[in-house]
Amino acid sequence: MSAPERRVPEARPSGQDARIDGLVAGLRQSPPSISPSWFYDRRGSALFERICEQPEYYLTRIELSIMDAHVREMAEALGPRIALIEPGAGSGLKTRRLLGALDSPASYVPVDISREHLLESASRLRADYQELHVHPVCADFTAPFDVPAAALEGARRNVVYFPGSTLGNWAPQDAVELLRRFARIAGPGGAVLLGLDMVKPVEVLERAYDDAAGVTAAFNLNALEHVNRVTGSRIDTSAFRHFAPWVAAHERIEMRLVARRDVAFELGAARVRLRRGEHLLTEYSHKYTAESAAQLAAEAGLVVQQAWFDPERWFGVWLLAPGGGAYAEPTDAPVS
Ligand code: AVI
């Protein structure tokens, strides 16, 4: 799709200038990159929901099946009267499975930047779990945020829940930093319950990020369309194609937009020139092994207490706690 003649930038809410500064800084890197946060405007969020329904995108389905099979053991391991804190949208099916199994949870604290989405899902949860204290926090969880004391009152333990392998979208050192912050929120007696996608055959991985219906391709290209809408830039999206290779050296899928021909555009102080075949980088999606997940936890000052997998070990849900205690491979893993 080529850019229309004249573009009127969308209104810039506060914080938008910093976001555009970040965009410009990314485009000045080599390779030029666009933060994955640019995927998620209204259209991008709808496309992401469709990705989760694609037969090739196994992540959501399998993590949910792990919750179905093991949520009682998870609830038992977490213990009674916990405060469950969820950075990111929350209140999806996985969260509901967990909330339904927990023993008298003290509170549920969804943290999200979109006030509208947050309040809507909080009121749906209140209607469905009438005993539950829901304390929505409107904040960008990628920056430090406060959990109100009232939300933690009466809780025996704080548990940060971060499903979906979302942590895999951070570069390794940033993932450690984010996990460290979650560990601090959980506190000394707390825990982090973390969903991570596992390393698996390359064909399975590459298909998951290039579905036959073209939904992931549209999602990737939408990042550029979103940039154009917000900044008024005129990047010609038809000059790019979606490509999502497995990069074995880093154990990650890289979402790329490859130039179909020589392309040049300007955005603020960034002057981007790509030869045909060169690319913009839009996302990392790191995959883990039991060892690299334990290593990531250790770098964040956490230890693996328990882990649950699907029978093929394509996805894992890890219970991490601060310091002490050794990781014992679950006796029933892989679990059917
Ligand atoms: C949100 N995140 C865990 C997704 C993933 O699998 O890395 C984002 C995504 N990108 C392309 N498809 C899905």
Image (cartoon, rainbow, N blue to C red):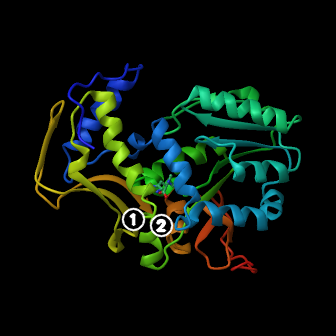
Q: Is residue 189 visible?
A: no
Tag 1–tag 2 contact (CB < 8 Å): yes
| Residue for point 18% across, 43% down | 28
Q: Is residue 316 visible?
A: yes
Residue 121 spot, x, y in % from top left: 69, 34
Residue 106, above or below 297: above
Total numbered circles? 2
151 and 136: which is toward the camera: 136
Label 1 or label 2, whichever lies nearer to me, is 2
Quarter of the image where the N terminus is located: top left
219 and 320: which is toward the camera: 219
250 and 254: which is toward the camera: 254
Residue 43 spot, x, y in % from top left: 47, 39
Residue 253 spot, x, y in % from top left: 39, 65
Q: Element type at marker 2?
A: helix
Q: Element type at marker 1?
A: strand
| Residue for point 49% across, 77% down | 200
Question: To which quarter of the image does residue 268 belong?
Answer: top left
Q: Specify the label residue 42 is tagged with.
A: none
| Residue for point 72% across, 49% down | 95
Residue 327, above or below 265: below
Please name the residue that numbered disc 1 is placed on. Answer: 253
Q: Residues within 10 Å of mark 1 (few under 14, many from 20)?
A: many
Q: CA distance from mark 1 to mark 2?
A: 10 Å
- Respond yes or no on whether mark 2 lies under 8 Å from ligand 1: yes
Question: To which quarter of the image does residue 70 belong?
Answer: bottom right
Q: Specify the label residue 208 is tagged with.
A: 2
Amino acid bearing label 1: Ile
- Respond yes or no on whether mark 1 lies under 8 Å from ligand 1: yes
